[in-house]
Image (cartoon, rainbow, N blue to C red):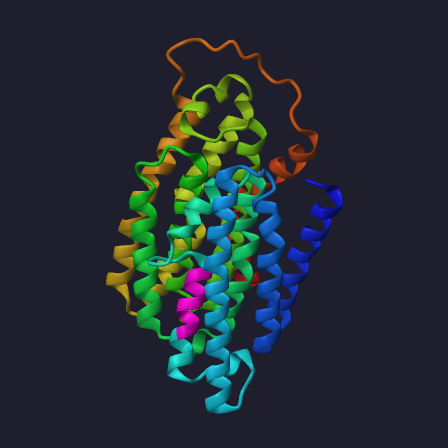
């Protein structure tokens, strides 16, 4: 891809996200979302492979549908209340339409079918952007309008997302699809608490972004696209594989790693809101995703291939990714003792 085109797309992504995050007006927020969609499309289709083109078309159709629903929701609200402010969403139909539109944009169940396919057709770095940066503007819209939305509907979407994200990831062999279902499952945890404690949703998203970025950058460095390739990656970069294993266990939410913190705080908050059955259900559903995280960790470090590999150890990896991966790996595994500070910050 032309470096100038890549620079324009990257700057447009940053600008679109910034416009949506910082705006209070529905039209400005919608404009930012449209800029984001148009900027990511060339990055998805840059390989010109048929699967990449298919992923691009699927992404464009789903995102344009969601954008049309957001515009229709804001118009309906403005027509009935005279308000274009995002925080003043009060019309019931508008609230329902916005919930559906953001669910499509985020890939929440039952609007999740496009997300694993699009990630599978993208490169590792583009898949990273789709899993992290592109989720931020829709989650911001949900945060700003969370007091107007239906908590029962959001809780139902969250539990279904945690269920399907764990269940459908069980039999996957492609790492990008596994991480896509991981993302769907984590979004369920973020959405279930958004009406009760929006700051906790923001903390969960921030920690999820750190851990997912670490996994994607590590897999991009060792060039692993499926589980069978992961079996022989141990012989190339042993230290990086050990780090990937710890980060995957952190994503699964095992103590004493960073990923345990948001799940612990969410279960605590749900219990305070007298939603103990809901907290129990979503905690049990996280065991499904724990299985495929453990399988990934097992493939990356514990299992050795039946035949010896002829690969020599890489004494020199990609220098551009070394420092970010090292810093993010440390954050992904060691932030649990800083829980009081994180809670104070968010």
Q: Is residue 1 magenta?
A: no
The reply, left or right, for residue 41 in relation to residue 100 is right
Which quadrant is the N terminus positioned in? top right
Residue at 57%, 44% (x, y): give it.
45
The reply, left or right, for residue 2 in relation to residue 283 is right
Q: Where is residue 249 in the image (x, y as percent from the top left)?
A: 42, 38
Q: Position of residue 23 (x, y in %)?
A: 62, 73
Residue 127 vertical position relative to residue 322 in the rendered view, above or below: below
Q: Closest to the observer: 180 or 268?
A: 180
Q: Position of residue 307 (x, y in %)?
A: 40, 9
Residue 229 vertical position relative to residue 37 in the rendered view, above or below: above
Q: Where is residue 19 in the image (x, y as percent from the top left)?
A: 65, 67
The reply, left or right, for residue 29 in relation to residue 12 is left
When asked about the image quadrant of residue 107, the answer is bottom left
Q: How many marks?
A: 0
Residue at 30%, 71% (x, y): give it.
152
Residue at 67%, 21% (x, y): give it.
316
Magenta segment boundaries in residue numbering: 97-105
């Amino acid at each position: 891809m032309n470096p100038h085109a890549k620079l324009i797309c990257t700057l447009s992504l940053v600008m679109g996200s910034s416009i949506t995050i910082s705006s209070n007006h529905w039209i400005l927020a919608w404009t930012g979302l449209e800029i984001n969609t148009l900027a990511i499309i060339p990055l998805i289709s840059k390989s010109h492979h048929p699967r990449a083109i298919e992923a691009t078309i699927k992404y464009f159709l789903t995102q344009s549908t969601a954008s049309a629903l957001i515009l229709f929701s804001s118009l309906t609200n403005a027509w009935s209340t005279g308000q274009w402010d995002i925080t003043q969403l009060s019309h019931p139909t508008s609230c329902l339409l916005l919930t559906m539109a953001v669910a499509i944009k985020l890939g929440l169940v039952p609007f999740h079918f496009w997300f694993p396919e699009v990630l599978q057709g993208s490169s590792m770095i583009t898949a990273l952007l789709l899993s992290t940066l592109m989720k931020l503007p829709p989650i911001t819209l949900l945060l700003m309008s969370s007091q107007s939305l239906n908590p029962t509907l959001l809780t139902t979407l969250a539990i279904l997302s945690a269920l399907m994200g764990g269940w459908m990831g069980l039999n996957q062999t492609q790492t990008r699809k596994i991480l896509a279902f991981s993302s769907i499952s984590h979004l369920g945890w973020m959405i279930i608490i958004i009406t009760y404690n929006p700051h906790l949703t923001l903390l969960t998203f921030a920690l999820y972004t750190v851990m997912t970025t670490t996994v994607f950058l590590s897999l991009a460095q060792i060039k692993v696209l499926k589980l069978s390739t992961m079996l022989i990656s141990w012989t190339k970069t042993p230290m990086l594989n050990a780090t990937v294993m710890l980060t995957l266990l952190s994503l699964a939410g095992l103590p004493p790693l960073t990923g345990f913190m948001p799940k612990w705080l969410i279960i605590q908050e749900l219990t305070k809101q007298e939603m103990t059955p809901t907290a129990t259900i979503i905690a049990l559903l996280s065991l499904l995703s724990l299985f495929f995280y453990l399988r990934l960790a097992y493939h990356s470090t514990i299992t050795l291939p039946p035949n010896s590999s002829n690969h020599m150890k890489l004494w020199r990896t990609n220098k551009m990714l070394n420092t970010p991966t090292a810093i993010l790996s440390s954050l992904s595994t060691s932030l649990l003792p800083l829980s009081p500070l994180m809670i104070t910050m968010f």
